[in-house]
């Protein structure tokens, strides 16, 4: 049993050894096979990678070749483009250079011609100078000879007449003075006689001719006092909350704004026409803009005031340029432009002044006086109606002071101050300006008056005539330019009618103010009436 166990144990040990050896061999064979497979796979992978790399390199080389060819073509095209541009620039530069060379060549030719001409003229001038020098020398010699001969003749005449040259000259002058005085007196008498015969006719001719030449219709401009609106809804916006807007507008413009039941209209009331115009323009801009509040109102009014001031100055400059008047003081130019917004009896003051200036220029030219000075005086004659302040002086005197202040000529100053007989006329231009002022104001259609003042003036005319004894009826006709006075035949004689007409005319002239002149006609008649039955 022990032997059997030993045998069995020995054999088991051998079997284990054999099994272990067999396992090792199997593992070795498997490892060798695995290594061989791995090596084969690695080789195949390397072979595949090498083919892939060669393919990529081949494709890259082909693509690089294509890009290279494209870049070469682009470079050639860019080179050709740059070459063409360079050639164009070179050609343009060459053209400019050739043009410059041509101009320089022409200038050189012109300069050479001018130089030749200058040299020729210089030679001619030298020749003329030499000739003049010779002639001057000859003239001096002749003058010396003439003086010598004159002295000899004077000595001979003094010896023959027994008088010196000075005594003979004085006697000749005295005789010529007496002869000239006699001729002058005769000529003056003839002129005076002729003037007396033709003065009235010539004056009428000059006045009528001047009126005809300046008889064009003149548009009458007035400052607008009524502002029209599209609808009554805007009135509420203009008034504002609790009247704030309208109070701000009145305070900024100095104009009273009346909003009443008048449809689609707002009344602007103020004595200053410039302020009314500023208010009208500002209100128009506010209504157009739609933003109406106190701050906006102050801004718009200030802008409008500056615009109106600029327009006034521009109007003055344009007027002086149109009339050909130069050298006016800037302040006088501004006052001339301000006349646009002032009217007298419905006649625009600027248009009236232009008309008077043209009439005065024409009359002065016809009378042989300075027409420019007369035109200047005619334009400035009513400058006292538009001052910045309001002194209590007649406008003629105020205008004269303004003209003196701004260094106008004495003739113009006297014409301004004397056109309403406020001062004495010392120049011939003054009565011309006065007459032209009367013509411009009295021509038909020049002025219009308010109906109340018109009726008042007619009533005053009739009452003045009725205040005289013997007057039964009076009629003011021809728009107040003629007054017909009917007297009783039993109270006034024929001789008294002339004195009555004269007294009525003088009283009207002293007590009333009116444009133009008024004709007074006194009528006296006796009627005998009977009836046949």
Image (cartoon, rainbow, N blue to C red):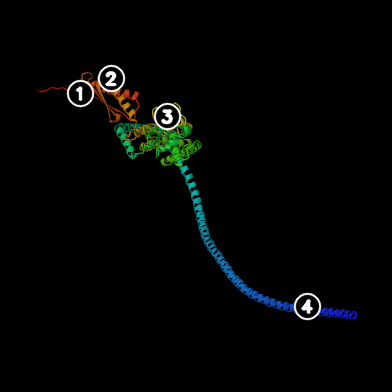
> Badges 2 and 3: C-beta atoms under 8 Å apart?
no
Image quarter of residue 158: top left
Image quarter of residue 432: top left
- The circle on residue 99 is none
> Badges 4 and 1: C-beta atoms under 8 Å apart?
no
- The circle on residue 525 is 1
Q: For numbered disc 4, what is the local secondary structure?
A: helix
- Upstream in sequence: badge 4 or badge 3: 4
Q: Say if 530 sits above or below 49 in the image.
A: above
Q: Quarter holding the N terminus? A: bottom right
- Upstream in sequence: badge 3 or badge 1: 3
> Residue 170 in the image: x percent, y percent?
42, 33
> Badges 3 and 1: C-beta atoms under 8 Å apart?
no
Determine the residue positioned at 34% across, 25% down: 512
- The circle on residue 31 is 4
Q: For numbered disc 2, what is the local secondary structure?
A: loop
Q: CA distance from mark 2 to mark 1?
A: 18 Å
Residue 370 visible in the current orientation: no
- The circle on residue 395 is 3
Q: What is the tally of numbered marks visible in this picture?
A: 4
The residue at which mark 2 appears reads as: 468
Q: CA distance from mark 4 to mark 1?
A: 174 Å
- In this view, the residue in front, 452 or 383, is 452
Q: On the rendered structure, is 58 left or right of 190?
A: right
């Amino acid at each position: 049993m022990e032997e059997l166990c030993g045998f069995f144990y020995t054999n088991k040990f051998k079997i284990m050894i054999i099994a272990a050896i067999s396992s090792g061999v199997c593992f070795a064979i498997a490892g060798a096979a695995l290594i061989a497979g791995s090596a084969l796979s690695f080789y195949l992978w390397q072979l595949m990678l090498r083919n892939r790399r060669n393919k990529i390199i081949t494709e890259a080389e082909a693509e690089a070749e294509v890009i290279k060819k494209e870049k070469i073509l682009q470079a050639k095209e860019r080179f050709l483009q740059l070459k063409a541009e360079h050639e164009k620039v070179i050609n343009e530069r060459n053209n400019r250079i050739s043009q410059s060379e041509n101009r320089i060549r022409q200038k050189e030719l012109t300069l050479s011609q001018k130089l030749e001409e200058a040299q020729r003229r210089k030679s001619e001038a030298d020749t003329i100078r030499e000739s003049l020098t010779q002639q001057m020398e000859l003239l001096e010699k002749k003058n010396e000879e003439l003086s010598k001969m004159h002295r000899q003749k004077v000595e001979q005449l003094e010896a023959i007449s027994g008088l010196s040259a000075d005594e003979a000259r004085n006697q000749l002058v005295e005789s010529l003075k007496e002869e000239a005085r006699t001729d002058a007196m005769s000529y003056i008498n003839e002129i005076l006689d002729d003037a007396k015969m033709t003065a009235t006719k010539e004056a009428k001719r000059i006045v009528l001719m001047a009126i005809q030449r300046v008889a064009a219709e003149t548009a009458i401009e007035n400052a607008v006092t009524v502002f029209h609106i599209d609808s009554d809804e805007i009135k509420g916006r203009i008034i504002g909350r609790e009247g704030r807007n309208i109070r701000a507008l009145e305070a900024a413009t100095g104009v009273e704004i009346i909003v009443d039941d008048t449809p689609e209209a707002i009344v602007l009331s103020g004595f200053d026409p410039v302020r009314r115009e500023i208010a009208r323009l500002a209100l128009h801009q506010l209504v157009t803009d739609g933003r109406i509040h106190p701050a906006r109102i102050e801004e718009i009014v200030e802008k409008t005031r500056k615009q109106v001031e600029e327009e006034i100055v521009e109007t003055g400059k344009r007027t002086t340029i149109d009339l050909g008047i130069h050298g006016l003081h800037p302040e006088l130019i501004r006052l001339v432009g301000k006349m646009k917004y002032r009217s007298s009896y419905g006649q625009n003051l600027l248009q009236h002044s232009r008309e008077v200036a043209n009439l005065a220029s024409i009359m002065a030219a016809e009378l042989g006086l300075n027409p420019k000075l007369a035109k200047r005086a005619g334009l400035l004659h009513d400058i006292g109606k538009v001052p910045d302040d309001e002194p209590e002086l007649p406008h003629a005197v105020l205008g004269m002071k303004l003209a003196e202040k701004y260094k106008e000529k004495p003739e113009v100053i006297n014409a301004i101050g004397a056109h309403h007989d406020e001062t004495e006329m010392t120049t011939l231009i003054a009565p011309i300006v006065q007459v032209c002022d009367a013509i411009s104001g009295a021509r038909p259609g020049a002025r219009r008056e308010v109906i109340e003042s018109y009726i008042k003036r007619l009533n005053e005319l009739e009452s003045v005539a009725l205040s005289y004894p013997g007057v039964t009826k009076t009629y003011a006709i021809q728009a107040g330019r003629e007054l017909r006075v009917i007297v009783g035949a039993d109270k006034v004689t024929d001789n008294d009618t002339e004195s009555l007409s004269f007294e009525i005319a003088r009283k009207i002239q002293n007590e009333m103010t009116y444009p133009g002149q008024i004709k007074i006609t006194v009528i006296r008649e006796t009627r005998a009436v009977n009836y046949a039955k």
